Image: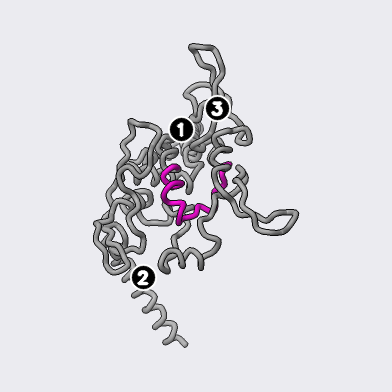
Amino acid sequence: MLRALTISAVAAAAAIGVAFAAGEGGHVEDYPFSFDSPVGGYDMGAVQRGYQVYAEVCASCHAVEHLAYRHLGEEGGPFAAYIVRNHETGEEEMVVHKPEHGGRFVDVTDNPYVRAIAQAAIIGDIDPNTGQPVDRPGRISDKFRRPFPNEIAARASNAGAYPPDLSVIVPARHGGADYVRAFLLGFTGEEDGTLFINTAFPGGRTAMAPQLMEGRVAYADADTPQTAEQYATDVATFLQWAADPHMEQRKKTGIVVLAFLAVLAGLLYLAYKQVWRGESH
């Protein structure tokens, strides 16, 4: 029994070593994302554009199952709406970014941008009267539309490969957002049978074909480059937000806690000096 366990442990360790060695071959560039630093936050323009790239390119194969459309319009979301007063006209207007000063948050149920995004999705459902499958426009309470009804259908549509869910793909991969960006830009144009050469992917070969090319997604902002590099950066930013939408609030809370602890430590030191003043140690 002990011999069998020992052999199994050695085999497992060898398998892990091979996997680690394969991962070493991937080239991942360290990209300066806005959220990398301890006090960094999301570039919401990039998150919005990244959602567009996901919706127009990635969503045909990959799900983001833990997100609902309403999350896009909640506070801290890329399409959160606020009512602000126009200083020139004095009229109130709705904007889709948090203003620097003031502003009244619009509840997600009243957010027209999120409603439009949800209604553009066709969701499979069951008719409550007939019990038959039907397709209907999405609601803000719906989870993001899944591209395939099950794993078998997903593999059948992708030559046997199973497109992973992207809900937590960033923290699940070594290198995080840097890896996701590098993977999307790592295709060399070469093929090995049914696989594609990718310099960032562990092992160098992946079943996914290159998806991002210049001009594929039409950004509304004409000043933003419509290049593969920009698409990859934006969708990596969106996927980081999708995996950790409360990161900014957590960082702010952490800074407040650290400041409190620093002040408390100072007060405790002064109290210690006062209590033991004049005493020899």
Residue that label 2 marks: 16
Q: Which contiguous range is marked in magenta?
A: 52-70
Look at the numbered discs 3 and 1 and tell me whether their residues touch, using CB distance below 8 Å: no
| Position of residue 162 measured from the top left corner of the image (x, y, whole percent) | 44, 64
Three-letter amino acid code of the residue under disc 3: Tyr
Look at the numbered discs 2 and 1 and tell me whether their residues touch, using CB distance below 8 Å: no
Query: With 3 as the anchor, is 93 left or right in this view?
Result: right
Is residue 56 inside the magenta stretch?
yes
Q: CA distance from mark 2 to mark 1?
A: 47 Å
Q: Earlier along the polypeptide chain: callout 2 or callout 1?
A: 2
Label 2, residues with CA under 10 Å away: few <14, some 14-19, many ≥20: few
The foreground one among 184 and 195 is 195
Query: Is residue 108 positioned above or below 189 on the image?
Result: above
User: What residue sits 32% from the left and 55% below the top?
Assistant: 210
Is residue 63 inside the magenta stretch?
yes
Label 1, residues with CA under 10 Å away: few <14, some 14-19, many ≥20: few
Query: Is residue 215 positioned above or below 222 on the image?
Result: below
Numbered disc in front, either 2 or 1: 2
Three-letter amino acid code of the residue under disc 2: Ile
| Position of residue 34 measured from the top left corner of the image (x, y, whole percent) | 37, 38
SS for tag 1? helix
User: What residue sits 70% from the left and 54% below the top?
Assistant: 127
Three-letter amino acid code of the residue under disc 1: Gly
The image quarter containing residue 209 is: bottom left
- Residue 266 tag number: 1
User: What residue sits 43% from the left and 56% below the top?
Assistant: 172
The foreground one among 125 and 80 is 125
Q: How is the image coloured?
A: one colour
